[in-house]
Amino acid sequence: SHRCLDNRAAALGSTGMDFLIGFTGKDYAIIAADANAARSIMVYSQQLDKIRELDSHKLLAVGGDAADCIQEPEYIQKNMTLYAMRNGVQLTTHAAANYIRGEKSYNLRRAMSQVDMLLVGYDEGVGPSLYFLDYLASMQKLDYASHGYGGFFCNSLLDTHWRADLTEEQGLELLERCFKEVQTRFMISMPNFTIKVVDKNGVRTVERKS
């Protein structure tokens, strides 16, 4: 579980140009995504939030086809909310990951979506967790992971500097190293990133230090 999986969807241009990264730390999980909204050779915005709050203790980062990145996460979020209303309890992160994987697997030959995902959450008695899901419905629980071409530049940094006992401050420093590497090496401009954290107190957005 210590390996960072390369993005097997990189051949899909719309997926590869998104950059998602996440890892677990000491009593928290952190996730980040670039803020570009682009199609073909055009960038429409650099303020897009690609990280959706599924509930009070789960975050889902998505990358891929622009329409699918809205429809599929909304469908997942609404059904998880419906489950919680009917049963009086929220899905655990592990259960949510399996639910998402099941939906993507069912739709592979029916209404396939081109969306890669990183799911992070915090569960009482379990702690933080991270799940890697791709557009082909594979799923794996990992300590750290990335999607998109930008991830190719960060795997070695995560291999070298990630530790299970990283404090939040150290985790943010590691993210900034990854951002700097992507901004230096990747030919696509990614000036802005969204960072969100989940811990026992819930989810929150973290502002980058200028």
Image (cartoon, helix red, strand yellow):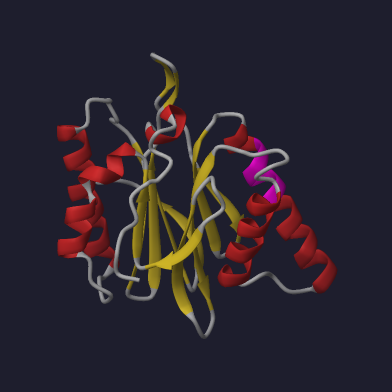
Residue at (39, 69) in percent of width and height: 28
Position in image of residue 203 (x %, y %): 50, 60
Q: Residue at x 40, y 33 (%)?
A: 11
Asked if residue 173 shows in the view, the reply is: no
| Residue farthest front in this picture | 109
Image: magenta residue range? 71-76
What is the x, y in percent for residue 175? 25, 52
Residue 117: horizontal and vertical position, in percent? 50, 49
Q: Is residue 72 magenta?
A: yes
Image check: 171 left or right of 145? left
Question: Would you say 134 lies left or right of 16 here?
Answer: right
Question: Looking at the image, which residue sits at the far right?
Answer: 86
Q: What secondary structure prevails in the magenta region?
A: helix
Q: Does residue 130 lie above or below 118 as drawn?
A: below
Q: Which sits in the foreground, 43 or 88?
A: 43
Residue at horizontal 34%, vertical 47%? 207
> In which image quadrant can residue 16 be found?
top left
Q: Is residue 201 above or below residue 47?
A: below
Please determine whether, in this image, residue 51 is positioned above or below residue 159.
above
Q: Is residue 75 left or right of residue 25?
A: right
Q: Nearer the viewer, residue 94 or 189?
A: 94
Q: Residue at x 54, y 41 (%)?
A: 115
Residue 201 painted magenta: no
x, y percentage for residue 156?
Answer: 17, 54
| The C terminus sits in image quarter | top left
Residue 171 or residue 147, whichever sits in front: 147
